[in-house]
Amino acid sequence: MTRVRSEDPAAALGAHGTALREATNADAVGGRIPRYVATPPDTDAVSALLSAATRHGLACVARGNGTKIDWGAPPRRVDVVIDTSALRGVDHAAGDLVVRCGAGTSMATLRETLAAAGQRLSADTPVRDSTLGGLIATGLSGPRRMLHGPLRDLIIGMTTVRADGVVASSGGRVVKNVAGYDLGKLHTGALGTLGVTTSVTLRLHPVPPARRAVTVTPGDVARARELTRDVLRSHVVPAAIELDWPHGGQPGLRVLVEGAEGGIEARATEVAELLGSGVIAPEPDQGWELLPGVAGDTVIRLAVPLTDVAHAVTTLRDTADAAGVPASIRGSMGAGVLHAALPADADPRAVSGIIRGTRNAVTRGSLTVPHAATPLREEVAERGPDLLWGEVAGLGLMRAVKDRLDPDHLLSPGRFAGGI
Amino acid sequence: MSETVHALIPRLRAICGDDGVITDSAQRRTYESDGLAYHAAIPGVVVLPTSTEQVADVVRLCSENGVPFVPRGAGTGLSAGALPHSGGVLIVTSRMRRIREIDIDNECAIVEPGVANLEVTRASAPHGYYYAPDPSSQQVCSVGGNIAENSGGAHCLKYGFTVNHVLGLEIVTPSGEVVRLGGKSAEAPGYDLLGAFIGSEGTLGIATEVTVRLMRAPQRVTTVLAAFESMDAGGSAVSDIIAGGVLPAAVEMMDALAIEAAEAAVACEYPEGAAAVLIVELDGPAADVDAQFDAVTELCRHNGAFEIRTASDAAERARIWKGRKSAFAAVGRISPAYIVQDGVVPRTALGEVLHRISELSQRSGIRVANVFHAGDGNLHPLVLFDDSDPEAGERAEEVSGAILDLCIEHGGSITGEHGVGVDKVCTMPRMFGPADLETMDRFRGAFDPDGIANPEKLLPTPRLCGERPGVRKGEHPLVAEGTAELF
């Protein structure tokens, strides 16, 4: 690394139209307060900014609306927060069912723009007020992932700025494309450790003309799993099968079907019959796609084979109950990816006990902790990030990828698995 | 055979057994090319491992000795991605063809890389499930090869590509390490190396075990064939169908020359006088498909379709698909040689690009038959020429290259499903800038710092570039045998 000591860091960071200000406590990332907040107006400015940051050895973390800025482990260092809010702009090619937009675009804006043309991004927004870039960095997908795949499956092109300021694109503007490595996959869920994504091209779907939500209270999660299997074995092709098990309540199962107006009643009725006593509603309840709990809670993610969902979920709930920690669980029974929320003020020792205890019982798949509430985060800062990720297969390759793309470890250092 | 490779042979025999190592030059020659026969090189040595351990041991040996290796599945690829290295080891997965597990409750199957794509569907069919990616060579092409190429197929418009249907891989990295990426669950912690590995064309290592997602077979499949008096009318029907909110499983189109070839080859009996034939396949819940069927046929009529045929059982469906599936091979009946191109344009640019291709054809005197996945803008122009005339060959290559230029100019891609391989390695800089390519090379280097995994494929190198894109001459051996079809 070459550091240019004669150059004033603030002047260098603030060049190319980037707005620069001193950071405040409100700009903290995982409890670390940066020195500056930079708001670059476009990809070229991000390039200049990162290039300047590298010259000065400054660690950077990108931030959209900041709703998930504390996700991951606390970064070892953060000098500059890169605010992506000016990286907006939605270029919607409706006839091609494709949209290209700035990473700082809010999901709400994107949704409105697409809806005007009768189209949508078939990925949900599990955290309100998220930006596209924030969802991509955290690799967060909602209920419809069951039918349409996780968010990464809908990304067809991406432009990302490397730590050294080099702007690199992969993929393209057409859905069918196998030219070159698909680096968009790599950046999805990478918590900004491999580059700052500035622009993304997405595959869209027409908004289905009709939908129905069918709900049932199956009694327990094992029964919910049996019902899920029955629906999956039928021919109704649901868009989502969701479990919702709030603390202090009964587990509920919700099946969403979407499609042609002419066929929707028959499909919903078939689901209701499969569920035994399913109740059909025209729309799912508001907020059904959101993570359980409230902002600030510790969020645990279970990703397991479908047959293991009931065991994993029940173990987590039982372990939390035994520790006196209220746990709310919600997620896809059809994809086998669910989230649990534990209150932010829960005793961190109890929470780590729940994490370790449940992880030991999850023999296939994984238990990870996308967000650790403040007290738990302090423990992670002290003892290392393994509590959040558990065992990660291929970590050696992941470190090699990080070393190649960010050799000085200046992008969100320490925020990712294995301390990457 | 290079001396370095020669020195490895006793150790390769110790790893793979005497019958798992091919040194005889005539036998090695049978592996000299894949489906793109224009590129040929005799491999230094061929190994046929039967287990992950053998693959890992072979790769480790290569790594320790700085010897390049090239993975090969069934050899049906169309970009010379499995072109052997004359001073290297060709690792063929054809003896790793066990289906290890069909796990219906978890909607997945675990297979070895040499298993043929269609075998996965055959093994799942009794349970009412299938494996969605369906490249046209699916009877013979291997799942491992599909991983390398991120294969699609006619139905990827609705169901996506291989990458959307693989849950887990066991890979041998270029250093010989065995790494598991993913498994039976939908996601795994850490970077999505699984997603990035799929489509990496054998440059990041070899997949030795694959966990694929199985899908419930659709309740109803309805296939519609519509004949139009012009390509414009057919194209306009496609636009209206997509704009109408219908997502068919497949939307395929052929022009008059492609139809003529198919009639000559397989007598598919498409409507007489058709300047364009459109095939639309709908699948899903019966009620949904029926509603969509009405919409699709109405839109075809509205755009001037003069004949519409409908298939609702497998035999009728096969009749409709017969002409389309035979199209690549069929042009052999109307031309001594041809180049198969694989480019993509945004769907809205299809009409314009087809007109420009037609102009190119008229200007050069080189005939172009158009067969394409209209739903996703993936063109497969067949550039026809007489290879006894060297000038015609050159003109055909120019036309083929100009078609790719058109794709790039309209914001498309140089390859939708055949891959880059050797064939398009020098075309990559027309789609990606130096920074993009250098970043991809960094990623490659993380897996393969010594550059021994399928070298000189996918990313351009100064030595390779300057070569011309490939020309297909005659039939692919697998097609001639009747075990494969190309489309």
Image (cartoon, coloured by chain):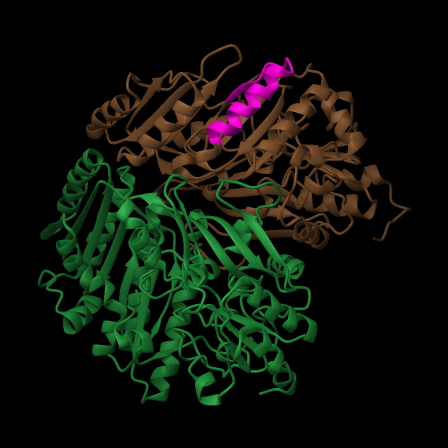
Chain colours: A brown, B green
Q: Is any atom of residue B255 visible in this view? A: no
Residue B210 within the segment the image draws in magenta: no
Percent of width and height locating residue B416? 41, 58
| Image height of B48 relative to B347, above or below | below
Magenta stretch prevailing secondary structure: helix
Q: Position of residue B418 (x, y in %)?
A: 41, 64
Q: From the viewer's perspective, is residue B315 above or below residue B340?
A: above
Give whichever of A342, B423 is nearer the camera. Answer: A342
Left or right: A375, with B429 as reference point: right
- The part of the image, by quadrant, that contains residue A40 is top right
State the quadrant of the C terminus of chain B.
bottom left
Looking at this view, is B10 or A229 the one in front? B10
Q: Nearer the viewer, residue B380 or A255?
A: A255
Q: Quadrant of residue A366?
A: top right
Percent x, y for residue A200? Answer: 53, 42
Q: Is residue A162 above or below residue A64?
A: below
Please tell me which residue is depicted at 28% across the width and 19% down the height of the picture. Answer: A276
For the N terminus of chain B, which image quadrant?
bottom right
Q: Using the rendered view, name the quadrant where residue A263 is placed.
A: top left
| Residue B321 as seen in the image, left or right of residue A307 | left
Determine the residue positioned at 38% across, 71% down: B400
Residue A303, percent from left and from top: 53, 35
Residue A6 visible in rendering: yes
Q: Which residues are magenta?
A: A309-329
Q: Is residue B192 left or right of residue B309?
A: right
